[in-house]
Image (cartoon, rainbow, N blue to C red):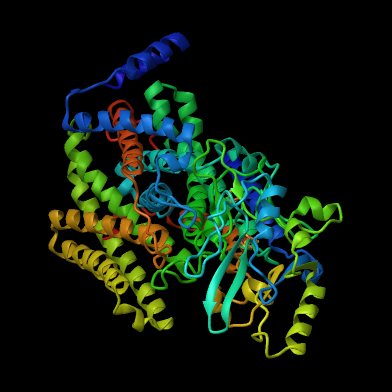
Amino acid sequence: MSIDRRSFFKALGVTGMTLAAGSRLSASPVPVDKNEFLGILYDSTRCAGCQGCEFACAEAHGLPAPSFEDVPVAGTVRKTDETRRTVINAYKTTRGDIYVKRQCMHCNDPACTAACLTKAMYKNEQGPVSWRGNKCMGCRYCMVSCPFDMPKFEYHSPNPKIVKCDMCSDRLTEGLKPACADQCPTEALVSGTRRELLAEARKRINDNPGQYYDQIYGEHEAGGTGYLYLSPVPFEEVGFNTTLQKSSYPALTKGFLYAVPSIFVLWPAVLLGIQQATKNDNNNAEEDE
Amino acid sequence: MSNGNYTVQQNNGIRSTWKFILGELKPKGKLLTPFNIISVPVIITGIALIIIRFWKGIGSVTNLSQEVPWGLWIGFDVVTGVAFAGGAYVITFMVYILNMKKYQSIVRVTVLNGFLAYLFYAGALLLDLGRPWNVINPIIGNSFGTSSVLFLVAWHFLLYMIAELIEFSPAVAEWLGARRAHKILSGMTLGAVIFGITLSTLHQSGLGALFLMAKDKIHPLWYSEFIPAMFFVSSIFAGLSMVIFEGSVSQRVFSDQISETSHRSHDSILHSLSKICAVAMFAYFTLNVLVFIHEKRWSLLNTPMGYWYLTEIIGFVLLPMILFFMSYRKRNITMIRVASLMTMAGIVLNRLNISVIGFKWDSVSHYYPSWMEITVTLTVIFTEIWIFRWVIRRLPVLREAPGWNSHN
Ligand code: SF4
Ligand code: SF4
């Protein structure tokens, strides 16, 4: 019987190691220069609030076009949901009415993909973060984890999808621009690599320091995002969370995930050791008192 | 139901085994108990609601929103339920690893309770999945999201249920009169226990680690990088309080099953358990205080959420901890029971404060569970109790085993 037991432990050990190795492999960062990811620069000083991007997005993804009453009005915040992947909002600020587009930020190191246990949510080598229905099990952990609250869920469908901006990743692979950036009449939306966009944004701030607030939102937020924003006013005035941490969100769970393999190796050994040590000690019941 | 039954059963082959099982499926005991009268209508309503949920979508029965994607079903059924199921790993640790034979009489019932809790409460997760048919993806390996804490937790649930099944399987073998299987299965117990404790350490803390990325969404009084450690430590006394509570109920409800000796030893077991609870709670309380001071959270205290936090920590951790200490010194069983109930309430509060109440506490619209969510949760709990009772009445769980293995 002791042999049985030993082989059983061996089997346990192997399972443990496989599980452990799995989490170790994935924890190592992908050797990709995050600045080569494709992204979009949104300059709110150029945006006319025409909602052209909303229409283009709806058309490109087979979603209902916004109705005529559904327009940006200062004082009300429109939110993306399962029927719209992007929205334009209006804000009354110290420098007049300002429009701001919102959608998934396409983080460099996204919380949603780290959360996803099926890899349904994933960031491809080009940069867009998108969702695959054949993998997703609808646990909504991506929604819990995203610091920008961007993944949305079809609560009223028996076959629900996670809905969010995917930067038109299909169009990008064909070499086209995202639908919203493609049609923007005022060029408030520009697409390019993150490196190009950051340089362009900084140039605009330097050329026109009076026109811009000196910050590129998305340069550092949540470890850097693919979407970058320029604004004439501080970002908290136009609905942005400026208290988000500057490092990546998945890093918050790395410590825990790194500890898993060692516990898996150490714990069984420790437990077996204690078991052997206390084995012939029949007086334990009293010891406890 | 004497042991003689088993020997007779053994020789009659598979056919009579089936006949035996079919016979065992029939209800035993009175039908019109208060519990049955309450639980049956609830379960029927719950099943109807579950059908609606799969037909019309999760939103048709729950109050979940785009901002609050996890509600009662995750926060209570899964996150809280699994903490209560922690008793199994603590008790198996004491009996099989520390060789404290004193607790032998409660091992089986605790493991059974733990196994059923995982089966039902973690199983309730399936109701909450929008696309449950894809649940096999992270299991069969065509999509391993290994960087996900949820991936780890899901796998550990699954493996731990297998470990608990192995730990419990000798009782099943005794019930079926399978001596050979019994011998093999008993031989696997220690391995299963060691594996099970390791898995429990990781997934009890993993449940807490699930919320680490929701840093900006959870009220700062409850969020810290130490959530995993706190979840682990609190699962010790959460599980033991459940053992105390369940034991006290079982002593009354299933008194026919319990032998005179284990009946008498039960009080002494309760006293020792309450001491362990008190020590674990002291560690937990200290951890909370340290985190509180370290993160300089004084300014948060004088707010409604601050009072709520104090209620949880003082009213439902410190107070029951003191009661546990006192009950141990005064040998007062009633006090133990009160303390264990308060501790359990405190665990419910804590888990819900992190996963539901303190989640998006600052948003305009708040989440409250719908009556339908509550009914489905009750359905899960009641069904579990039905199965638990069914097993207790038939298998040698509380009563003495037939004594096939004199030693292990
Ligand atoms: S904004 Fe949210 S959904 Fe978009 S990539 Fe970042 S974490 Fe994912
Ligand atoms: S809901 Fe789908 S995409 Fe989101 S974490 Fe779960 S499995 Fe991944």
Q: Is residue B21 above or below residue B313?
A: above
- Between B278 and A198, the residue placed more toward the observer is A198
Q: Quadrant of the N terminus of chain B?
A: top left
Q: Is residue B140 above or below residue B95?
A: above
- Between B256 and B187, the residue placed more toward the observer is B256
- Between B44 and B211, the residue placed more toward the observer is B44
Image quadrant of ligand 1 equals bottom right
Please state if A81 lies on the left or on the right of B109 as rendered: right
- Is residue B310 visible to us here? yes
Measured as percent of width and height from the top left, residue A3 is found at 60, 40
Please state if A23 lies on the left or on the right of B391 as rendered: right
- Is residue B186 visible to us here? no
* Residue at horizontal 15 percent and vertical 54 percent from the top: B333
Measured as percent of width and height from the top left, residue B336 is found at 19, 56
Q: Quadrant of the C terminus of chain B?
A: top left
Please state if B119 lies on the left or on the right of B322 as rendered: right
Which residue ends up furthest to the front in the rendered image?
Answer: A68
Badge count: 0
Which residue ends up furthest to the right in the rendered image?
Answer: A175
* Residue at horizontal 39 percent and vertical 31 percent from the top: B171
Measured as percent of width and height from the top left, residue B334 is found at 13, 54
Measured as percent of width and height from the top left, residue A7 is found at 63, 42
Q: Toward which corner of the image does residue B398 lie, by quadrant?
A: top left
* Residue at horizontal 20 percent and vertical 29 percent from the top: B37
